[in-house]
Image: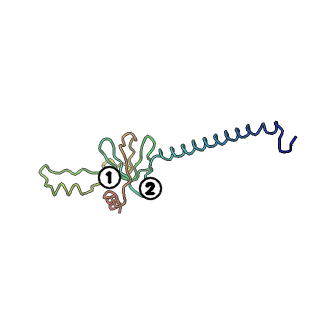
Amino acid sequence: MDSKQQHPAATAGRPKRRKERDQLFIAIGGVVIVLVGLVTWLWMSAPERPLADRYQAVFLDNGQAFFGKLKNVTGEYLVIEEAYRAQAQDLPSDATDEQKEAVANNVSLIKVGKEVYGPENAVRVRAEQVVYWQNLTPDSKVSKAIEDNDE
């Protein structure tokens, strides 16, 4: 037998090993793709978190709005600490445009807990009642009114 020629039994296992190796690479590639997809889906579907250094506005389906520190966005109830609610200002029916504009530009907040019945300064609202919530900017009228009220 020529030294360059190999025994047929020695070369018979090579295509089988190559096929097994290719299948292993395909399986590993599939697992990596699934893991990357799962991590991306979890990251994209995670709820936005309230920023701890800001106040949040929470709008309910009954038209009420609360402002304060939103402590959670998951679960049956959302908790708003250091809570305020907007106070509606009544205007007479013959109010001038200047009076209407002054009221529209004035932020009037009532601190939760100042009511006659003496509740604590936190509000728990059913999650299903929340239409949406937002982080407020530090320079918003509401943020400034809360800061001024806490001083």
Q: Nearer the viewer, residue 12 or 119?
A: 12
- What colour scheme has been applied to the protein in the rendered image? rainbow
Q: Is residue 125 left or right of residue 106?
A: right
Left or right of 68? Residue 95 is: left
Q: Nearer the viewer, residue 21 or 7?
A: 7
Q: Amino acid at mark 1?
A: Lys
149, above or below 40, in the image: below
Tell me the tag on residue 52: 2
Q: Earlier in the sequence, mark 2 or mark 1?
A: 2
Q: Name the residue at 40% across, 53% down.
A: 69
Q: Which residue position holds label 1? A: 114
Nearer-the-camera pick, 90 or 72: 72
Location of residue 61 in the rendering, given as x and y in whole percent from the top left corner: 32, 41
Question: As drawn, which residue projects farthest toward the bottom?
Answer: 151
- Quadrant where the C terminus lies? bottom left
Residue 53, quarter of picture: bottom left
In the displayed image of the protein, which residue is found farthest to the right?
1
Please report the residue visible at 20 percent of the width from the left and 58 percent of the height from the top: 102
Q: Secondary structure at mark 2?
A: loop
Residue at the outermost left position: 94
Q: Position of residue 37 (x, y in %)?
A: 54, 43
For discs 2 and 1, the disc positioned in front in the rendered view: 2
- The Cα–Cα distance between marks 2 and 1, rounded to whole angstroms, is 24 Å
